[in-house]
Image: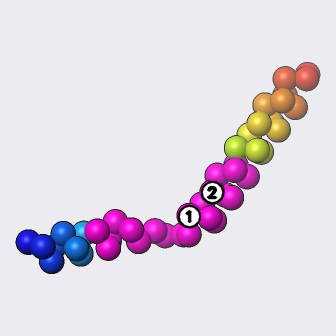
Amino acid sequence: MIKSLILAEGAKRHLAASPVFFGLFAFGVLAVLLYLVLRLDKD
């Protein structure tokens, strides 16, 4: 049972991309959305 917990912990920590890349990607998407909202609000 201990081995299965250790394996589950390792699988949980494996991400498709690094946390830094994920943070930059999320920041970029939010920045673009904010830009579009503010730009559309002017019209």
Q: Position of residue 35 (x, y in %)?
A: 82, 38
Q: Position of residue 29 (x, y in %)?
A: 70, 49
Q: What residue lies at 74% left-to-right and 40% top-to-bottom?
A: 33
Q: Which residue is mark 1?
A: 19
Farthest residue to the left: give it.
1
| Left/right of residue 36 with respect to residue 10 in the rendered view | right
Q: Position of residue 21 (x, y in %)?
A: 63, 65
Q: What residue lies at 69% left-to-right and 50% top-to-bottom?
A: 27
Q: Which residue is mark 2?
A: 23
Q: What residue lies at 18% left-to-right and 69% top-to-bottom?
A: 5
Element assignment for label 2:
helix
For badge 2, the amino acid type reads Gly
For badge 1, the amino acid type reads Pro
Element assignment for label 1:
helix
Q: Which residues are magenta?
A: 9-29
| Left/right of residue 31 with respect to residue 25 in the rendered view | right
Disc 1 to disc 2: CB gap under 8 Å: yes
Q: What residue lies at 91% left-to-right and 22% top-to-bottom?
A: 43
Q: Is residue 34 magenta?
A: no
